[in-house]
Amino acid sequence: AVYEGMIIGLNTRVDDIEINVAKGKHLTNMRAANSDIAIALTPALKMSLEQYLDFLEDDELLEVTPKSLRLRKKFLSKLDRVRAARV
């Protein structure tokens, strides 16, 4: 399950990118529809507990469950993150 505030990928920018992974991509041109089907996804990174702890930023938390380790933002909603950044 994916929820708001969950960290799902990496980017090369300094700031974070807000996306909705549950929302599908809009197809505006039917000729380009076949090119979207052929996208190859890279597998998820499998990191150890120590690697996750090194990866953490100041505004992030690590969720530890018996089956998985997940990174998430300290404040789940974007509005809460904006409010916390002002203080």
Image (cartoon, rainbow, N blue to C red):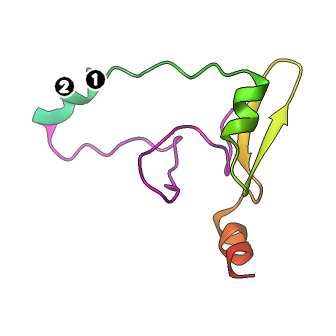
Quarter occupied by residue 6: top right
- The extreme left residue here reads 31
Instruction: Count every numbered label the image shows and give the total.
Output: 2
Q: CA distance from mark 2 to mark 1?
A: 5 Å
Q: Residue 29 bears which disc, if any?
A: none
Disc 2 secondary structure class: helix
The amino acid pointed to by label 1 is Ile
The residue segment tinted magenta is: 1-30
Q: On the image, numbered disc 2 is attached to which residue?
A: 34
Q: On the image, numbered disc 1 is attached to which residue?
A: 37
The amino acid pointed to by label 2 is Asn
Cβ atoms under marks 2 and 1 closer than 8 Å: yes
In the image, is residue 60 above or below residue 36? below
Instruction: State the image coordinates of residue 54 (x, y, percent, origin top left).
Output: 70, 37
- The extreme bottom residue here reads 87
Name the magenta segment's main secondary structure.
loop
Q: Give me the residue at 65% from left, 37% from top.
A: 2
Classify 10 Å Cα crowding around label 1: few (below 14), some (14-19), many (20 and above).
Answer: few
Residue placed most toward the observer, 38 or 46:
46
Instruction: State the image coordinates of residue 51 (x, y, percent, origin top left).
Output: 70, 28
In the image, is residue 82 above or below residue 68? below
Q: Give me the residue at 15% from left, 35% from top.
A: 32
- Residue 17 drawn in magenta: yes
Instruction: State the image coordinates of residue 77 (x, y, percent, origin top left).
Output: 70, 61
- Residue 28 drawn in magenta: yes
Tell me: 25 left or right of 86: left
